[in-house]
Image (cartoon, grey):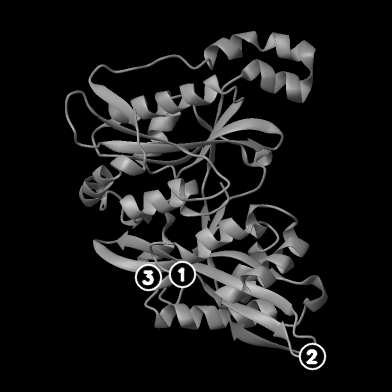
Amino acid sequence: MWKAVKYKPENLPETIKMTREYYGDSWISNLDFLKWQYETNPAGPAIIQLARDVESDQLAGQYVVIPMRFKAFHEAINGTLSLNTLTRKIYGGQGIFTGLAKAVYQESAEQGALFCYGFPNPNSYPGFTRKLGFTDLGSVPLLLRPLNTKALVRKKLGSLLGSLSLPLHFYYKVRSNSDSSYEVYPLDPSNLSDLNVFWAKIQDKYPIMGVRDADYIRWRYFDIPLRDYQVYGVRRKNETELLGYIVGRCTEVASMSSGMIVDFLIAPEHPAAGNCLVNTLLRFFADRKMELAGSLLLPHTEESRILKKNGFFTCPKSLEPQPFPVVYRRLNHFNEKDPFLQLNHWFLTMGDYDVI
């Protein structure tokens, strides 16, 4: 038997112990990371329900969402992002996942959240769509661009074929592609105020967008433990108005040194400024010996088109490390005409979830 109990900050060490049993020693079970994720989010603290064994008093599972602010159809609204969900294996089949989820959704709705969304992995996907009433909106394409074709081919196919990839190596070599009309410069906590003006002007570029103001960017990319991000802004030469930004991170994906474009947003009608941002970040990746660049962006976005003009291509489904489905659940009444059910209304990047 288990019972649902509301999470309190003093439960964090106990949940970390349970998480380490499930995921091992990683960022998802790190004290500093979870305190950042659960307690310092500018949209509000995490909403968590825990399952506790009535007899032994040990934790049996958890269901977690974090509040996320959105601008949708010209209105400021609140949603939640589902993450870090788990049930201890010995408690499987007892309805913990669905029981805790329903309690979290009720609390979320009471706090004013209109919906919950997530990017479930293949193991959790069936639970969201079959048990919790989530709708699969479709998948976000993985965009890839080789940075060192010779190294990639050698690593995957051997040194002989690596030498035959020389023409592709030169084709994908990152070259300086600067435009003297624009200036790309690092963004850091001291100059993030420009983002508030930028966000105010761009917040309706797409029908549904997660808020990307200075508070969010500071929390998501600068305050976060265990990860280092490179953040650039762009403006016209001799002007101060921010026209866009890009966020990158060097990491390892499937044993390949990878530069991931985590977030990328550009003011409308400034594709040349977007090209400058992408080129600057690609050169940053190349200087650090990254072999591959990647990003998640929906194809209807201007940002996706800019990446494709800079050598990115859509990864074939058969080669994806995993699919990247977006699932969505309305927290009040379900409406088949709900405009949130159309993925082409959304603007989503890796920055809209927690993995990269």
Q: Position of residue 217 (x, y in %)?
A: 38, 49
Q: Are marks 3 and 2 in contact (CB under 8 Å)?
A: no
Q: If you read the primary sequence from the N terminus, does the residue marked by circle 1 or circle 3 appear first?
A: 1
Residue with the mark numbered 1: 45
Amino acid type at image mark 2: Glu
Q: How many marks?
A: 3
Amino acid on which disc 3 is placed: Lys
Q: Which residue is mark 3?
A: 337
Residue 102 coordinates in the image, percent (x, y): 56, 81
Q: Is residue 332 at all visible to an observer of this figure?
A: no
- Residue at 63% across, 19% down: 149
Residue 105 at x, y percent in the picture: 50, 78
Helix or strand or loop: what does disc 2 sit on? loop
Relative to 268, 331 lies left or right: right
Residue 286 coordinates in the image, percent (x, y): 54, 21
Q: Is residue 58 above or below residue 127?
A: below
Evaluate if marks 1 and 2 touch, with contact meaning CB atoms under 8 Å apart.
no
Question: Is 315 in front, or is 16?
Answer: 16
At label 1, which amino acid type do we have?
Answer: Pro
- At 61% from the left and 73% from the top, the residue drawn is 63
**Which residue in the structure is indicated by mark 2?**
55
Residue 182 versus residue 224: which sits nearer the camera? 224
Which residue shows up at 74% across the image and 61% down it?
20
Q: Could you tell me how far apart the alpha carbons at marks 3 and 2 are, in whole angstroms?
A: 46 Å
Estimate the spatial distance between the alpha carbons at disc 1 and disc 2, rounded to whole Å: 30 Å
Instruction: Identify the mark nearer the N-term, 1 or 2.
Output: 1
Q: Nearer the viewer, mark 3 or mark 2?
A: 2
Q: Nearer the viewer, residue 296 or 220?
A: 220
Label 3 environment density (alpha carbons within 10 Å; few <14, some 14–19, many ≥20): few
Quadrant where the N terminus is found in the figure: bottom right
